Structure formats: C-alpha cells, structure tokens
Amino acid sequence: MYQAFWLAVQFLTRLPTPSIGVATSRQVGISVLFYPVVGLLIGCLLAVFSLLIHGLNQYLQAALVLVAWVFLTGGLHLDGLADCADAWAGGLGSKEQSLAIMKDPAAGPIAVIILILIILVKWSALISIVNQQELEKLLAFPIMGRVSILLLMLSTPYVREKGLGETMSNNLPAQKAWGVVLVSLLISTWILGFFAIALACLLIWVLRRMALLRLGGVTGDVYGAVLEMVEAASMVIAVWKFG
C-alpha cells in the first residue's frame, strides 16, 4: 500500500517522491485507490498557498493559485483534454481516426480554444472563492476530478491496447474502489453540497456516454479530459450556488 500511494503521487503530481523501485501490475492497479487522496493533497496545498498570498489582489491571487495547480499536476490532464478536443473535432465520428488524432502530440486550434476556455472558467471561479475566503472548497474540486477516473475505470471499457490505463483498470480492486468512491463523494458533498456533487456526477455520465458513442470506451486522454471538465464544472456550480 505504501508503494501504491507513492505511485499515485508520482503519476498525478510533480511532487518529489521516495524511490519505490519497479512496480508490479497489481501495485499499479491498487495505486488508483489513492487518486482521491492525492486530490485531497493537491487541494490542501492549494488552500495553504492561497492563505500565504492572501494579501495580494484577488485577481492575481486567483491566477497564482491556478498556476500552482497546473504546476502541481504538470498539466497532465490538460493535455488529455486538448487531445480529446482535437479528436472530437477532427475524428469525424470515426473511432480509428479519433484514436489516431489523440496519439498526435501536436495541438490544433480547437485544442487551444478549449484549453483557454477551461482555464478562463477556473480562474473566474477562483476569483470568487479566494475573494470570499472559502478555501475549503479547494479541497473538494481535485477530489471530484479524480473520483471521475475511478468511476470511468469501474464502469467503462478501456479501448487502447497495452496502454497504462488498461493495466490500471484490469488490476483495480473493484470492491475497494467503490468504497473509495463512496467515501470521496460523501466528503465532497459535505464540502460543496449535494446539488454540486449530483450535477458533477451527471456530467461524468454524459461524458462517459459520449466516449462510448465515439470510441466504444475510454482512453487515458478521456480520463484527463473528464477530470478537467468535472473540476471546472464543480467550481462553477459551487460558486453559483454558494458564492
């Protein structure tokens, strides 16, 4: 479990981690159980950082928190969102063409537009959150984003052969994963309220349905895209309802 936790930290963040050696497929699968925990860790670091720069202008404070957020995650999931945006625009409804576009490292104009929009939405929501000093909400957004990955792994086939996501989903302990999902949703509901979490779960279902219709399942890029969109949607809903 120790190695699995640090595997999750190593994969989802750019934080320094101890040497953990070569991981087995089973350990890779177990590491997914810690994704919401890593989300909580990210949220705590963002909240502490926001407190440290509290005296700054609210717009600059929100921008710096967002920069720290991207730095902590290495932009990993933003990359997945960009790849999916290009694939949905250029795949022309074809599974094979969509998957091929996702593997292309180049970002097209649609990807750039979507990235700008998602970052703008997050920054705007952060302005309200830091202005009202409701920093506890920062704990829930990364948790919900990573819960979305568990839900997709538990309910949706992985379509890219020999991908890392295939190893994760095939070795994920399903019963324990559902327990982690339940606890994570309860914590997030306590912080954000039932309405925000219910709509976030509805969005996960809609995006899952879109992936099934286009690809017949999910890929690592889809995991990243759903995570980013769930985080952004959770932020908007939280600010709208409670801001």
Image: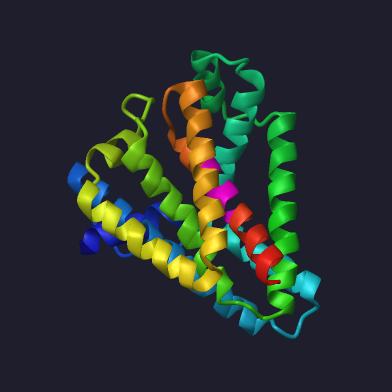
Point 54% across, 27% down: residue = 102
Point 29% across, 39% down: residue = 169
Please tell me in which quadrant of the rendered image residue 134 appears.
bottom right
Asked if residue 230 is among those painted magenta in the image, a careful observer would answer yes
The color scheme shown is: rainbow
Whether residue 74 is visible here, answered yes or no, is no
Please tell me in which quadrant of the rendered image residue 167 appears.
top left
- Residue 20, given in percent of the width and then of the height, sits at 25, 58
Magenta stretch: helix, strand or loop mostly: helix
Quarter holding the N terminus is bottom left
124 vs 73, left or right, is right
Q: Is residue 114 above or below residue 192?
A: above
Residue range in magenta is: 225-231
Q: Is residue 194 above or below residue 12?
A: below
Asked if residue 228 is among those painted magenta in the image, a careful observer would answer yes
Whether residue 96 is visible here, answered yes or no, is yes
- Residue 40, given in percent of the width and then of the height, sits at 44, 68
- Residue 189, given in percent of the width and then of the height, sits at 48, 67
Point 53% across, 37% down: residue = 207
- Residue 43, given in percent of the width and then of the height, sits at 51, 69
